[in-house]
């Protein structure tokens, strides 16, 4: 069941406000909601919130046999769960167009961009590798679910620690955390996703991190995935008004600034969480 369409009064109010560079939640057009990160007791468990949009990410690891075509690389799989708990537009067993778009974008940003070094997941070439399964539970969709899920996923990878392994001949020994400290994953880069919403009136300035109402009233979305080092991973634009090359570059520059801010937030949050865990161990 799709949510009810916004009323004419809501549309007029939102469009009039956007023409004056105002948004109904008080933000500026190019201002994001402040993200918050909450780490679970297990390493690799992270809950990310953008306003009222919330996503829970969790990573599980197990040893498997590698694929024949890539015997020296580990395996990474991403699964996203969008149930009616996240929003009334989602149904169990019937993925919506938005759900398919989000899943494909997450696969491009988190797996195919080689954010995690897959060769470092190899234990014994051709015989044993780590299989990392990232599961994203969408708890609440209040707009811009993609950016929230992407942030939760990459932070979960950085937060996760794989067990220490020792190989002696054909025997593989996996040590519990009590005996040997688990090792962090080898991360090549930290991509973030920044989404812009465009509106039917080309004179209306696009907004960053659209709310649920803004996303519903938009004529199209553009998602830019990149890291703090200005390395562009993915650009995806669905619908909306045509963009000139100069406008596209200006929006990418905005996304770079947001990615740098997110990178600082993530590193500070991880450092704070790890410090608290070290104190607990002592």
Image (cartoon, rainbow, N blue to C red):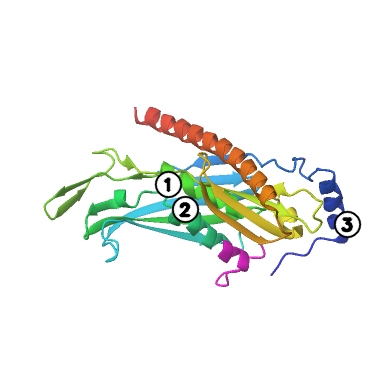
What is the span of residues highlighted in magenta in the rendered image? 88-101
Q: Nearer the viewer, mark 1 or mark 2?
A: 2
Q: CA distance from mark 1 to mark 3?
A: 44 Å
Q: Residues within 10 Å of mark 2 (few under 14, many from 20)?
A: many
Which residue has dot 1 on it?
Answer: 157
Nearer-N-terminus badge (1/3)? 3
Query: Dot 3, crowdedness within 10 Å: few (<14), some or many (≥20)?
Result: few
Where is residue 221? Give x, y as percent. Answer: 67, 57
> Going by the image, does 125 lie left or right of 137?
left
Q: Position of residue 282 (x, y in %)?
A: 34, 27
Residue 188 placement (x, y as % from top left): 40, 44
In the displayed orientation, state which residue is furthest to the left: 169
Q: Secondary structure at mark 2?
A: helix
Residue that label 3 marks: 9
Q: Quadrant of the N terminus?
A: bottom right
The residue under label 2 is 110
In the rendered structure, does residue 21 fall within the stretch colored magenta?
A: no
Identity of the residue drawn at 74% across and 49% down = 206
Q: Are marks 1 and 2 in contact (CB under 8 Å)?
A: yes
Q: Position of residue 122 (x, y in %)?
A: 27, 53
Tell me the crowding category of disc 1: few under 14, some 14 to 19, or many 20 or more residues within 10 angstroms, Cα based.
Answer: many
Q: Marks 2 and 3, Cα distance to the nearest angstrom?
A: 40 Å
Membership of 91 in magenta stretch? yes
Q: Nearer the viewer, residue 56 or 66?
A: 66
Q: Nearer the viewer, residue 210 or 196?
A: 196
Give SS at disc 1: helix
Is there any visible trace of residue 201 in the rendered image?
yes
| Residue displayed at 59% across by 58% down | 236
The residues tagged by marks 1 and 2 sit, at their Cα atoms, a distance apart of 9 Å
């Amino acid at each position: 069941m799709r949510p009810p369409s916004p009323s004419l009064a809501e549309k007029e109010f939102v469009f009039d406000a956007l023409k004056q560079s105002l948004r109904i939640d008080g933000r500026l057009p190019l201002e994001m909601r402040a993200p918050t990160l909450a780490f679970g007791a297990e390493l690799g468990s992270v809950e990310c919130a953008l306003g009222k949009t919330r996503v829970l990410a969790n990573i599980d690891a197990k040893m498997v046999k590698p694929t024949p075509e890539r015997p020296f690389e580990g395996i990474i799989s991403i699964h996203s769960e969008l149930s009616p708990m996240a929003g009334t537009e989602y149904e169990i067993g019937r993925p919506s167009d938005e759900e398919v778009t989000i899943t494909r974008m997450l696969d491009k940003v988190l797996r195919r961009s080689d954010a995690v070094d897959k060769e470092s997941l190899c234990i014994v070439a051709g015989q044993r590798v780590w299989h990392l399964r990232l599961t994203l539970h969408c708890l609440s969709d209040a707009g811009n679910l993609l950016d929230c899920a992407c942030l939760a996923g990459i932070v979960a990878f950085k937060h996760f620690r794989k067990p220490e392994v020792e190989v002696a001949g054909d025997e593989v020994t996996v040590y519990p955390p009590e005996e040997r400290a688990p090792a962090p994953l080898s991360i090549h880069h930290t991509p973030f996703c920044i989404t812009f919403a465009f509106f039917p009136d080309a004179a209306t300035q696009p907004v960053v991190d659209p709310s649920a109402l803004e996303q519903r009233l938009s004529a199209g979305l553009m998602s830019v995935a990149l890291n703090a080092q200005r390395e562009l991973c993915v650009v995806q634009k669905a619908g909306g008004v045509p963009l000139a090359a100069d406008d596209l570059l200006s929006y990418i520059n905005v996304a770079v600034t947001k990615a740098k801010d997110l990178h600082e937030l993530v590193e500070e949050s991880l450092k704070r969480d790890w410090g608290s865990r070290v104190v607990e161990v002592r």
